[in-house]
Amino acid sequence: MARGITETEVHSAADALVVGGERPTVERIRAHLGTGSPNTVVRWLDTWWKGLGERLEARRAGVNLPDAPEEVSELASQLWSVALAHADFAAKAALAADREALDQARVQLDRERQLVQDEVSALRRDAADACHARDVSIARAEELARLVRQLETQLEGLGHQRADAEARAKDADLARQEAENRLLLLQEQSVLDRKSLTRHVQAVEDRAHGEVDRARRETQELKRELAALGRDRAASDATNLRRLEEVRSELALARQEAAVERSKAEALERQLLHLRDLPAALTSALERAKPKPKPKRRRPAKAHGPDAG
C-alpha cells in the first residue's frame, strides 16, 4: 500500500527530473519517490507547474549581471526568455499529457473498480450459494444419518426375525422327520393290517362257502330223507324248514360279516392311499411355513409357523 507523500517531495522530485533532462510525469515522479498515489502526485504536480513561472521569473532577475557588458546581459536575457518560453510550452504539453494519462488512469481505475465490484458481487453470490449448499448438505447428511440409524434398527429386527425363522425351520424339520417316521410306521402297520384283514376276509369267505356247502349237503340230505320218509313229511317238513331257516340265517350272518370285513378292508385301502399323499402335504405345509420376504423400510409382522406333528 502506497504511503502518503507531501507537496515538497513531489516538487523536489520534479526539479530533480528537470535537472536530469527528463520531463516530470506522474509515473516518473512515482518511480523517483518509490511510492505515492497517482491522484496525489497529479495534484502536487499541478501546483509545481503553476509555480514554475514564478520560479523562472525569480531566476530571470538573478540572470541580470550588473558588471557584465550590456550586449552580454541582453543576449543572456534573450536566451533566458527563450528558455522560459520553451519550458512553459514543455510544461503545458507535459501537463496536458499528464492529465490525459490521468484521465486514462481514472478510466482504467473505474473499469478495474467495476470489475472488482462485479467480482465481489460474484464472490458474495458464490458465498451465498456455498452457504446454501452447505446447509443443504448438512440437512442431507442428517437425513442420511437418520436413515442409517433406521436401517440399522431394521437390520437388527430382521436379524431377530431370521433367528426366529431359523428356529421355526429347525422345529419344522424335526416335525417333518417325526411325521415321516410316523408315516413309515403307519405304512408298515397298514401293510400288516391289510395282510391280517385279507387273511380274516379269506377265512370268513372260506367259512361262508363251507357253511353254504354244508347247507347244500344238508338240504340234499333232507330232500333224500323227505323222499324216503314220505310218511313223516308233515312233521319233518316243519323240522327241515326250521333247520333251513337257521342255515339261511347263519348264511346271511356270514355274508354280513364278510361285507363288514370287506368295508374295513376298503377303509384301510383308502387310509393307505391317504397316507401315501401325506409326504406331499407335509412338504406343502413346510413351504407355507417358511417366512415370506419382507418389504424394505417396514418392519414386517412375525410369521407363525405351523404346529408340529
Image: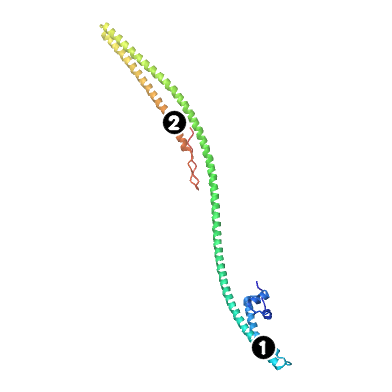
Q: Position of residue 235 (x, y in %)?
A: 27, 9
Where is mark 2, residue-wise?
A: 278
Of residues 85 and 103, the one drawn nearer to the viewer in this rendering: 85
* 110 to the left or right of 270: right
Alpha carbon distance from label 2 to label 1: 141 Å
Q: Position of residue 91 (x, y in %)?
A: 63, 83
| 281 w.r.t. 82: above or below | above
Quadrant (top left/top right/bottom left/bottom right) for the N terminus: bottom right
Closer to viewer: mark 2 or mark 1: 1
Mark 2 Cα within 10 Å, few/some/many (few <14, many 20+)?
Answer: some
| 218 w.r.t. 33: above or below | above
Residue type at mark 1 is Leu
Of residues 54 and 81, the one drawn nearer to the viewer in this rendering: 81
Q: Position of residue 188 (x, y in %)?
A: 46, 24
Q: Secondary structure at mark 2?
A: helix
Q: Residue at x 46, y 34 (%)?
A: 283
Q: Residue at x 33, y 16 (%)?
A: 251
Q: Secondary structure at mark 1?
A: helix
Q: Position of residue 249 (x, y in %)?
A: 33, 17
* 247 to the left or right of 34: left
| 5 w.r.t. 284: above or below | below
Q: Quadrant of residue 240?
A: top left
Q: Quadrant of residue 221?
A: top left
Residue type at mark 2 is Leu
Where is mark 1, residue-wise?
A: 79
Q: Residue at x 62, y 83 (%)?
A: 90
Q: Which colour assignment does the render follow?
A: rainbow
